[in-house]
Image (tube, rainbow, N blue to C red):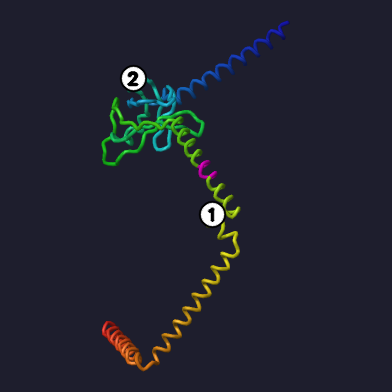
Amino acid sequence: METHSSKFKIRLGLFITVGLALFVFAVFIIGKQKNLFNPVFKLYTTFYNVSGLQVGNNVRFSGINVGTVDNITILNDTTVLIDVLIRKEVQKFIKTDCQTSIGSSGIIGDRILIISQGSSNAPAVKNGQTLLSVEPVETDAIMASINITAGNAEIISYQLASMLLKINSGKGTLGRLIQDTSIAENLNQTIINLKKGTKGLDENMEAAKHNVLFRGYYRNKAKKAAEKKVDEQKTNEINKK
């Protein structure tokens, strides 16, 4: 009987010890996340729409979690005030011209408050100071824009498919040009005629060069070209010197 009682006491003691250890660990983790054990200072910012941001969400600066959202208050129908607690050690890096925005910790993660970097020559923020904000883009607005883009892409795809179907069927000027072999043959014959005409023109020009009436003209032209070449060579030699 005493052995059974002692085993029960040992189990009870172990259970209480483990429970207390888990409780202390949970308090430590929560306190660390809420900055209960670190010196902090408070900042304020306002938004028209907090886009799902909640008390306890992280505050991020330069990609690092530096604080938490302490309180969210509706001031009026157009303004929501957000109180944030920031670790004292990063106060010197947050400038007065920094701006706040609302983002996500991932694609489907919790909402977070993001503090952008300010200019290096601006003074550091003070406790209780209010930062300017940039309104978040709503997910509904993004989805509406995507739906419009998808609808336009669908219309364009349908029009392209209809146009290609007409071309393959031989409809329209382009379709007839592709499907009708006679048009292609006529086009080839036209190109051949143009080549023949160009060749004949070259032959006529060559014959004109040897004609008595045009011989003087072509000689003068050749002489001027030669003189121009000599002048260019002299100019190049002068420039080299």
Q: Nearer the viewer, residue 173 or 92?
A: 173
Under mark 1, the amino acid is Gly
Q: Nearer the viewer, residue 226 or 237?
A: 226
- The image shows residue 175 at horizontal and vertical percentages of 56, 56
Label 1 SS: helix
How far apart are the two marked residues, 2 and 1, measured between alpha carbons?
Answer: 60 Å
The disc, 2 or 1, on the residue closer to the chain's N-terminal end is 2
Residue under circle 1?
172
- The image shows residue 48 at horizontal and vertical percentages of 35, 25
| Residue at horizontal 60 percent and vertical 53 percent from the top | 169
- Residue 77 tag number: 2
Q: Nearer the viewer, residue 154 or 129?
A: 154
In this rendering, position of residue 78 left or right of residue 200: left
- Residue 26 tag number: none
- The image shows residue 44 at horizontal and vertical percentages of 32, 25
Most extreme residue toward the top, as rendered? 1
- The image shows residue 222 at horizontal and vertical percentages of 34, 89
Residues drawn in magenta:
153-158
Label 2 SS: loop
Total marks in image:
2
